Amino acid sequence: VTGVQTCALPIAESVRRLARMLGGARAPFLRVGLALGRHACGGRAVQAVLLLPALVGGWRRRGGGAFVESVHAFSLNYEALRRSQLRPGSLRVVNQALLGQALAELADPPVQAFFVMSSNPAVSCPDAERLRRALLRDDLFTVVHDTFLTETAELADIVLPACTALEHEDLFRSYGQLYMQYVRPAIPPLGQAR
């Protein structure tokens, strides 16, 4: 379904219009972006949207159905990229949706160091006010590595300037198709960016 503009319509009418379009489509196909799942109950929202083509039988017709991402199409050795063998001890995993709570309340041991790169959790995580208060703890050392002075960077103890995509070698895989792209730097890193 393309071209659905719901901003000007009341929500109920937007839902009815979408239902009519999906029900009338020969082979309805939904392409779900990753942002839909990046909030509290996001997994349920993704599940609900992915079920819509099934409700109207779209999966039975060639070209119909739903698609989330193509990340698993690439046979990359992510463990080699993460280099987990270089990390001492065990790693604690925290759900990003609960980051404010984790920084404020985790104990045994409490979080004492926080490294942020290419993210702005002070405004993008749920319970942002609690997260911002936790970032101001005297016993939390926060480092931000980014190309922008974000709201999170403004609360950090140290900000490390990051290179832009033009300044470093990289591989970009796609979220929605089957191509991987190798990128050569166009210019050397500017200033103290690394």
Image (spheres, rainbow, N blue to C red):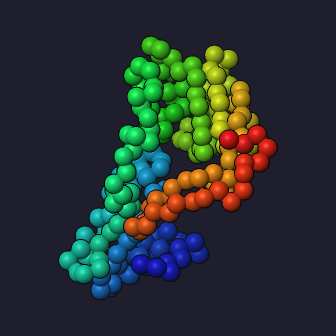
Q: Position of residue 18 (x, y in %)?
A: 41, 76
Q: Residue at x 54, y 26 (%)?
A: 103
Q: Residue at x 37, y 62 (%)?
A: 70
Left or right placement of residue 192 versus residue 69 in this view: right
Q: Is residue 174 visible?
A: no
What quarter of the picture does the C terminus occupy?
top right
Picture layout, residue 69 above or below residue 28: above
Count of residue discs: 0
Q: Is residue 137 visible?
A: yes
User: Which percent across, then down, holds residue 178?
Assistant: 39, 67
Determine the residue positioned at 65% across, 38% down: 145
Q: Is residue 25 left or right of residue 143?
A: left
Direction right: furthest residue: 191
Outermost residue toward the left? 60
Q: Is residue 104 above or below residue 132?
A: above
Q: Nearer the viewer, residue 94 or 11?
A: 94
Decide: is 132 above or below 66: above
Q: Position of residue 163 (x, y in %)?
A: 68, 47
Residue shown at the point (77%, 48%) measured from the top left: 190
Q: Where's residue 159, x and y in %? A: 71, 34
Pick the residue in front: 76 or 113. Answer: 76
